[in-house]
Image (cartoon, rainbow, N blue to C red):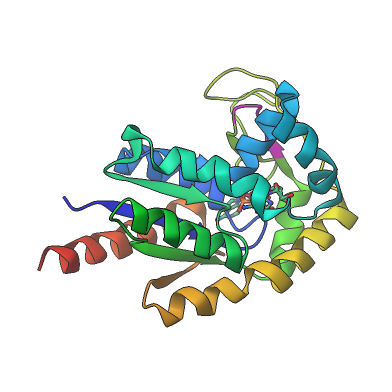
Amino acid sequence: MSELNLILLGPPGSGKGTQGELLQEDLRLPYYATGDILRAAVREGTEIGREAKGFMDRGDLVPDEVIVGVIAERIADKEAEDGFILDGFPRTEPQAEALADKLTELGRSVSVALLIDVPDEEVVRRLGGRRTCPNGHVYHVEFGPPKTEGVCDVCGAELEIRDDDKPDVIRHRLDQYHSKTEPLISYYEGRGLLQRVDGTQPPDEVNERIRALLATHQKEEEL
Ligand code: AP5
Ligand code: MG
């Protein structure tokens, strides 16, 4: 199988984390979610965590220079030599350029930028009922509840409401997405790398659609 360097693009709440978790099991590739990485850094009180916290609480993007180094280091790691799944990165054009440069340096390139498309009203509904565990597993009180209320099925940790899942912060995150991240759709479309999937379907159906798209991509690569 050829290398797969996959980017998950999409608004907050589109299901990047939900699909990332399923794909990681299926594709057996390392999964790097910048939101999860930054939240862990905040919990651990590292320098990056201290720098990022204020931006994250407000729903602003953290500065490019804070996040680019974190990802550059991971994709150059041996565990990512057959590919990787990126969730939440890149989120700005400078980040996309930095990723392309780093991959070029490694003699590689982005394989697919996969847009999970979901309208704003659905985002607001989803994030209002989201519950997460400290290890990044994602639930929804209505659309995907855990087996035992308040407890993660996978690691048994207590489920939490994210600090940035408050209505006004959700709105601000959406604004940030539309102004800073959405331009990446045409960026990747122009490079022939964009694939779209309808993210409003149930998680299993979205997953099946993504797997079908990726299978077609792999076949084309092998021709
Ligand atoms: P991040 O953690 O990446 O947040 P986000 O992009 O806002 O995305 P979310 O994690 O909120 O949503 P998701 O798409 O993963 O959806 P999920 O699967 O959870 O980033 C947080 C912050 O970190 C940023 O605001 C920024 O400050 C900073 N940051 C991170 N990366 C950065 C970068 N590169 N540059 C600068 N700053 C950066 O699903 C949502 C809910 O919906 C869940 O409850 C789930 O159960 C449910 N659900 C999922 N799929 C479905 C479905 N198909 N049907 C019904 N419900 C569903
Ligand atoms: Mg997420």
**Is residue 106 shown left or right of residue 7?**
left
Q: Is residue 152 visible?
A: yes
- Picture residue at 44% right of the left edge, 82% below the top: 190
Decide: is 209 above or below 165.
below
The correct choice, above or below, for 89 with respect to 219 in the image is above
What segment carries the magenta color?
Answer: 131-135
Q: Position of residue 74 (x, y in %)?
A: 45, 38
Q: Residue at x 24, y 51 (%)?
A: 3
Q: Is residue 27 left or right of residue 23?
A: left
Q: Is residue 97 magenta?
A: no
Name the spot of residue 200 as percent of width and height, x first: 57, 64
- Is 133 magenta? The answer is yes
Chief secondary structure of the magenta span? Answer: loop
Name which residue lies at 52% across and 63% down: 96
Question: Toward the viewer: 16 or 100?
Answer: 100
Q: Position of residue 144 (x, y in %)?
A: 60, 42
Q: Quadrant of residue 114?
A: bottom left
> Observer-nearest residue: 216 or 41?
41
Q: Residue at x 38, y 46 (%)?
A: 84
**Quadrant for the C terminus in the image:** bottom left
